[in-house]
Amino acid sequence: MRAVEALLRWRHAVRGSVPPMDFIPLLEETGLIVSVGEWVLEQSCAQMQAWIDEGMAPVRMAVNLSPRQLMVPGLGRIVRGILDRTGLQPELLELELTETTASLTMDAVIEVLHELHAIGITTAIDDFGIGHSWLGRLRHFPVQTLKIDRSFIQGMDQSAGDRAIVEALVALGHALGLTVVAEGVERERDLDLVREIGCDLAQGYYYSPAVDATTMAAMMRAETAHRAAA
């Protein structure tokens, strides 16, 4: 286990579990994504540090960052404050950018990414490959990780075209010195293929579906024991 990803879920008292696709767009539209996103970031950092304090082996915590959040004035100061309050080391935090981030003013994005990098945080491009926006800008953005969209990974064993795209994206990422992650790995066959192609890391249901903090803690205890026995 190298990292975990924090995912926002809403358990409504009446409606039960509300899918993210039903409320994330509303948060974006109203601007509440900024305050909610900051809360998610602090909760995620605090949770990882709590696990570390309990003696679990540290892994990186990945948190999604919306375009609105990225352009908040003083984002670096906000993130540094969260790290100071929670005690989490910067190298254990990864902020993931979505495809739509590439539509923002390039100079502004680059400035923010440099600021985050100076703190010691890893930044990643999520769902890479589903749009063309990143391709022309990738070489300019100081990110460290490229996460290939699940749609290509899951189609590789049926589509030579999807496999060719993944191979090209892996080659591109490595040529730029980036760590390449395959998203959506659900079967052993998927894992075999991404290993064969040269992806550095993989994530998906093959390892675990989304789980709550209690279940995640049990998985991290098992990982800690595994490392100790190795």
Image (cartoon, rainbow, N blue to C red):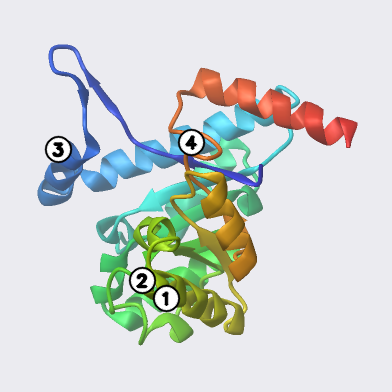
Contact flag, marks 1 and 4 (Cβ < 8 Å): no
The quadrant of the rendering that contains the N terminus is: top right
Between the C-alphas of marks 1 and 2, the distance is 8 Å
Q: Name the spot of residue 173 as percent of width and height, x first.
A: 54, 77
Q: Name the spot of residue 7 as percent of width and height, x first.
A: 38, 38
Q: Does any portion of residue 120 appear in the rendered image?
A: no
Q: Name the spot of residue 154 as percent of width and height, x first.
A: 40, 55
Label disc, if present, on residue 44 of the rendered structure: 4
Label disc, if present, on residue 165 of the rendered structure: 1
Q: The disc labelled 1 sits on which kind of residue?
A: Ile
Identify which residue is drawn at 50% across, 62% down. Answer: 123
Between the C-alphas of marks 3 and 4, the distance is 22 Å
Identify which residue is drawn at 35% across, 83% down. Answer: 107
Q: The disc labelled 3 sits on which kind of residue?
A: Asp
Contact flag, marks 1 and 2 (Cβ < 8 Å): yes
Q: Mark 3 points at which residue?
A: 22
For residue 35, above or below residue 144: above
